[in-house]
Amino acid sequence: MNLFDHTKLDFEVEKFSLYKAGPMLGFLALPKDIGVGLRRKDNGKPLAIVSERYEPVQYLDVTTGLEEAIRQSGIDLTDATFQSTLYGDGEQMELTARFPAHATTIDDKNDVITPEFKFRTSHNRTWANSGMMGFFRSSCYNTLVNGSKLAYVYGRHGKNFSVSSFAAKIKNAAEFISGDGLSEMKVWYNSEVDRDKVIKLFSNTLAKRMDNVTRATVPNKVMLSNLMKVFDEETRHLEGRGKYEAYGTRTKGNLWTAYQAATSWSTHVKKNNTKPLREEKVRKMLASPHWNELIAA
């Protein structure tokens, strides 16, 4: 059973060449480096003018990936509400879900908060890929919330946006909410850690490699750089002020942001056979003495 309304979202978009009026009532194709059009395949309605390099992400592809993550998490869907909203002819899409079965108090306050999932994107590039999940009293789409944020994504349209990576973050957040490993995850969320110690963690686990010359164990600098970039973004958006805060200003995060960075890395792959290998590395990291030392601290 679908969670969101697929009848609204079941259409694809495609790029098409643009033309201008030529002599004798003819038409001349515009150079593609000026731009191309984006239209719906089902009814031909144009939605936007984009660059030739622009790679549209179909709404239904994003939605089905997120639905699968929510289902796999074990979150209680009793009385859950799912809202799918299109604007205009489909230029913009917004998804919202609420999970009343997991309503609770947060931050030692008396008010009851219902966990929410929010995501929006667009084909006309007016909205970036922006989504989050957590316990919100209020929120804005610059990813600033009043409450606790457990997962987020904020990024421009392009090849670097990974549906599977965002879905993994949502699955982690849903597992946190549903109570699957809740006590352990709460420890991670409340365990502050210096950024330097996270570098050491990743250097000795996920990014560890053998130097062929010295035969010494050293970090893979490219992999470590990618992991720390995600960790810094997780910290900025989950602990900080989101897009209102400059990137790379925080020197501390927590074990939850490190965990989210690791799982995001493990699912952001181009080849399906790589994903199980990365997931196994994450499992080994969580069982490693380096991880346990951070918990103990």
Image: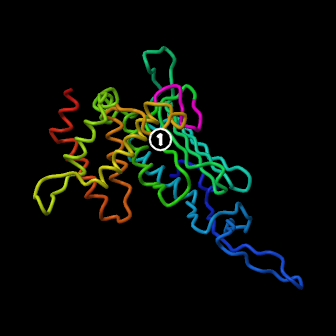
Taking the spot 58% from the left edge, 56% from the top edge, the residue there is 59
Q: Nearer the viewer, residue 97 or 121?
A: 121
Residue lying at the far left in this picture: please name it: 215
Q: Is residue 276 found left or right of 27 in the rendered image?
A: left
Q: Secondary structure at mark 1?
A: strand
Which quadrant would residue 250 be assigned to in this image? Answer: top left
Image location of residue 269, percent across then percent down: 37, 60
Disc 1: CA contacts within 10 A as few (<14), some (14-19) or many (>=20): many
- Magenta run includes residue 50: no
Q: Which residue is at a point 15% across and 38% down the rendered structure image?
A: 289
Q: Nearer the viewer, residue 78 or 169?
A: 169
In this picture, which residue range is highlighted in magenta? 139-148
Q: Position of residue 52 (x, y in %)?
A: 61, 69
Q: Say how the picture is coloured.
A: rainbow
Which quarter of the picture shows residue 143? top right
Residue 141 part of the magenta-drawn span: yes
Q: Is residue 7 left or right of residue 253?
A: right
Q: Residue at x 31, y 55 (%)?
A: 222
Horizontal and vertical percent for residue 264? Answer: 37, 49
Q: Is residue 29 left or right of residue 232?
A: right
Residue type, numbered disc 1: Tyr
Which quadrant would the C terminus be assigned to in this image? top left
Q: Which residue is mark 1?
A: 152
Q: Nearer the viewer, residue 93 or 99?
A: 93
Q: Residue lying furthest front in this view?
A: 213
